[in-house]
Amino acid sequence: MEEKKKIVFSAIKPSGDITLGNYLGAIKNWIGLQDEYECYYCIADLHAITVKQVPAQLRKRVLEILAIYIASGLDYRKSTLFVQSHVPAHSEASWILTCSANMGELSRMTQYKDKTSKLKENSSISAGLFNYPVLMAADILIYQADFVPVGVDQKQHVELSRDIAQRFNSAYSETFVLPDSKISESAAKIMDLTDPSKKMSKSDDNENSYILVLDPPDVIRRKISRAVTDSVGVVNYTDDQPGVKNLINIVCAIKGIRPEEVVASFEGRGYKEFKEYVAEVIVEELEPIQKKANELLTDKTQLEEIYTEGAMKANRIALKTLRKMQKKVGLLPAVLKYL
Ligand code: TRP
């Protein structure tokens, strides 16, 4: 008999356009998990609205991300690709779990502290931002996920999900699988091109600091040619040359090679040549994805079919867990005659 596959859940929050960092740090690693695991890959639009979004842009971006998922090699016949808000159980489970989470642990979340330290006025911080990790716990737990592939910055949130799951299990009896984060060794942490001490971020104001998956080739070449390096002038892989190190990491993540190999092939050659090479490696990787994604985006009905199919499957699984949760905490089962 075939053994039951372990479950993987992950998501990207559509709060900005997808960067090369998102692609190399997340999506590219998800692709390889599809055969071994039962995978749920979500677009976390409810997380995106914890900060103000332009509604029309958010809608457009969700479709773009779905197109990028598919164009990159996530296969909707193997994995469940869906939009978070299409599965109401996420919000409902999130409320129940909010009642099992406590203020103390939520206030200790690094991402919350970082985000709110910039906003001085308490009144402008949404309660959604505070509850963000509980919604994330709901995402993960309602699919009974075993593994959650994320970058290191989200590890703390996955650990919190595990803590909440454990607390719920011991208060109400075994309900959730306890999830583990899966930090891939090869998942690259791609840094800001203009300030390699920061992570590459789609919310940065300076558009030269990141590369978008849908950036046209000439834009990619321009941004790489402007990337910050140093005055050493030699392609080395060292923390003393963080800009060059970041560019090497990009090449390695795309080609699956080791930094020494890149360094060796650029011995005695300058940054200009090196940057031209880096730009070509990126263009070569992204061009086919862009072509496919743009094709998909011209036919919205196909995308619609794919996310509807995904939502149907996700709803079926998520509802099972939600019903269990409702029952365990003592909510009276509804008789849904009005549906
Ligand atoms: N918070 C994650 C991020 O910003 C996105 C996300 C939402 C997520 N829900 C999730 C990641 C559940 C893993 C599991 O990157």
Image (cartoon, rainbow, N blue to C red):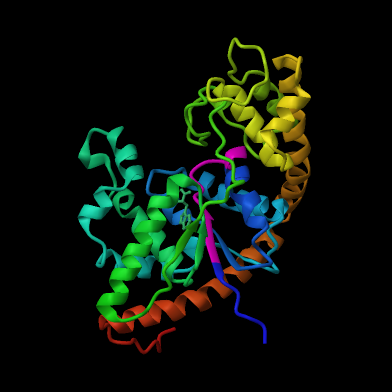
Identity of the residue drawn at 67% across and 52% down: 67
Q: In the drawing, does residue 57 fall left or right of residue 68?
A: left
Percent x, y for residue 25? Answer: 58, 45
Identity of the residue drawn at 38% across and 44% down: 51
Q: In the drawing, does residue 191 fall left or right of residue 236?
A: left
Check if residue 324 falls in the magenta segment: no
| Farthest top residue in view | 231
Identity of the residue drawn at 59% across and 66% down: 39
Task: Judge whether 268 appears above or below 20 on screen.
Answer: above
Q: In the drawing, does residue 278 fall left or right of residue 83?
A: right
The answer to whether one can see residue 96 in this image is no
The answer to whether one can see residue 262 in this image is yes
**Magenta stretch in the rendered image:** 8-21
Percent x, y for residue 236? Answer: 64, 22
Percent x, y for residue 59? Answer: 54, 51
Identity of the residue drawn at 64% across and 61% down: 33
Check if residue 18 falls in the magenta segment: yes
Percent x, y for residue 95? Answer: 31, 66
Task: Judge whether 337 appears above or below 313 on screen.
Answer: below
Q: Quadrant of the C terminus?
A: bottom left
Q: In the drawing, does residue 314 fall left or right of residue 163?
A: right
Q: Quadrant of the N terminus?
A: bottom right
Foreground of the two, 218 or 308: 218
